[in-house]
Image: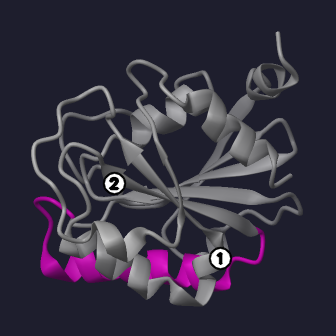
Amino acid sequence: MSSVTSYFKKNTDFILSATQPRQYPNVVFPEVAFIGRSNVGKSSLINAVFMKKLAHISNTPGKTRQINFFNHGDSLMVVDLPGYGFAKISQKEAYKISDLVSQYLTTRENLKKIFVLIDNGLGAKKIDIEMVNAMQAIKDKIFICYTKSDKKIKEKSIYINELANYEQLTVSSKTNDNIFELQKKIIGIL
């Protein structure tokens, strides 16, 4: 078993769900965060990378409405951020979630890498570009993950060139395609 695989087999424990910054855990180890459009496969990817069921997989898009923190082996904090393009919630609640995510991304000093997930079959949408553009202050932390590489590409994105300057990887949590490469990327920031 490789040292990468051994690292990801360590215990990962749910710490808390935060709805405001004062609730964030006070830890010293680095954080990696995952964000993407609702229904992009975020929970499935987190579970595949950490080789266990951490994030709840739902059939209803937009279920994650708070920031979920997981402690991986007392060496890494894994952060599951609410999806954007929130489904079936009020505009007021959508703004509240958007503000929470924005505050986290711009103030969390431990954040080392933000994995922006985009459905490979649908390609980048305008909302994905808007999210990436909103993170320009931390653009060096952005890593683009195209999810669901096992599915057929339904449409070519007109925004493909707008993401060309970011590190990218195409992955599948279903077939584990490039999951090991993503694990190596995470270990590389420790």
Which mark, by number, is residue 140?
Answer: 1
SS assignment at label 2: strand
**Residue 149: x, y in percent?**
33, 33
The residue beneath circle 2 is: 118
Dividing the picture into quadrants, the one containing residue 132 is: bottom left
Residue kind at label 1, given as amino acid type = Asp
Please give the name of the residue rendered at 80% of the width and 27% of the height, measured from the top-left corner: 4
User: Which part of the image, by quadrant, shows the N terminus?
Assistant: top right
* Image spot of residue 94 (x, y percent): 24, 75
Q: Position of residue 48 (x, y in %)?
A: 52, 27
Identify the magenta region. Answer: 86-110
- Which is more toward the observer, 29 or 143? 143
Q: Quadrant of residue 17?
A: bottom right
Contact, mark 2 vs mark 1 (Cβ under 8 Å) = no
Q: Residue at x 21, y 64 (%)?
A: 86
* Residue 165 falls left or right of residue 131: right
Of residue 140 and residue 155, the one placed in the foreground of this image is 155
Q: Is residue 134 magenta?
A: no
Q: Is residue 99 magenta?
A: yes
